Image: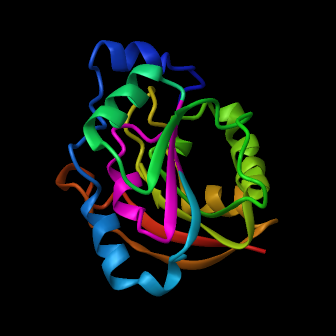
Amino acid sequence: MSNKVIDWEKQWQESHTPWDKGESSPALIKFLKDHSDLIPSKGKGLVPGTGSGYDVVLFSSPDLHMTGLDMSSTCIKQAQKKHGHGNYDFICDDFYTFQYPKGGYDLVYDYTFLCAMPLDMRPAWGQRMAEIIKPGGVLIALMYPLNDKSSQPPNTVSVSLFHELLDENFENIFLEDAVGHSDRIGDEKMSVWKRK
């Protein structure tokens, strides 16, 4: 595994975005359909490392405002242009230092965000999730990759890693194998963590 810091702005400027599948994961679409009872239907939500913003738009509803957050200004501009207007917005900022809404989020969705973190930043990821998600709110995490891919990010994650980072402040209320994009079958699990 790698502790390398990626220049995300350069990746987007050079259109080197192999993680972008052109749509939300089929695993997320199925989860939203089958388990809507686990998802807040109103309030505020966040997708850190938003990429092209597909998940932001998918989660948003008239009663649930979603924000897509990314460190790359090129990424954010592309998402804004691609998706136009709705009950969502996209902001360019640092997940660890940005000003989050007073009271915190009802929902945060992580997919290919934790796995992109340098290894020494993983504890800070867990602490920040606890800070920005309100009590009773949820972190939905589509865990990927569960199997070692290479020495470069995405870094391998595991169910035990999520427990290690989250158990102090969250209760794991849902966990199952996920069937997402075809090249990721067997390498993902969908999970929901409720803020204590």
Left or right for 87, reference 29: right
Q: Residue furthest left?
A: 182
Task: Please give the name of the residue rendered at 20% of the width and 43% of the height, measured from the top-left corner.
Answer: 22
Q: Residue 80's x, y, as percent?
A: 36, 35
Task: Please give the name of the residue rendered at 44% of the width and 42% of the height, measured from the top-left corner.
Answer: 50
Is 52 within the magenta?
Answer: yes
Q: Nearer the viewer, residue 55 or 42?
A: 42
Q: Is residue 159 above or below residue 42?
A: above
Left or right for 13, reference 8: left
Q: Residue 123's x, y, as percent?
A: 75, 44
Q: Nearer the viewer, residue 79 or 130?
A: 79
Q: Quadrant of residue 134?
A: bottom right
Q: Residue 142's x, y, as percent?
A: 44, 60
Q: Is residue 98 above or below residue 65?
A: above
Q: Is residue 164 above or below residue 18?
A: below
Left or right for 115, reference 194: left
Is 148 within the magenta?
Answer: no
Q: Is residue 27 above or below residue 114?
A: below
Q: Residue 100's x, y, as percent?
A: 71, 46
Task: Please give the name of the residue rendered at 70% of the width and 53% of the height, measured from the top-left corner.
Answer: 129
Left or right for 134, reference 110: right
Task: Please give the name of the residue rendered at 27% of the width and 31% of the height, measured from the top-left corner.
Answer: 18
Instruction: Tell me the quadrant of the picture where the C terminus can be found.
Output: bottom right
Numbered label tally? 0
- Magenta residues? 47-70
> By what rule are the colours in the image chosen?
rainbow
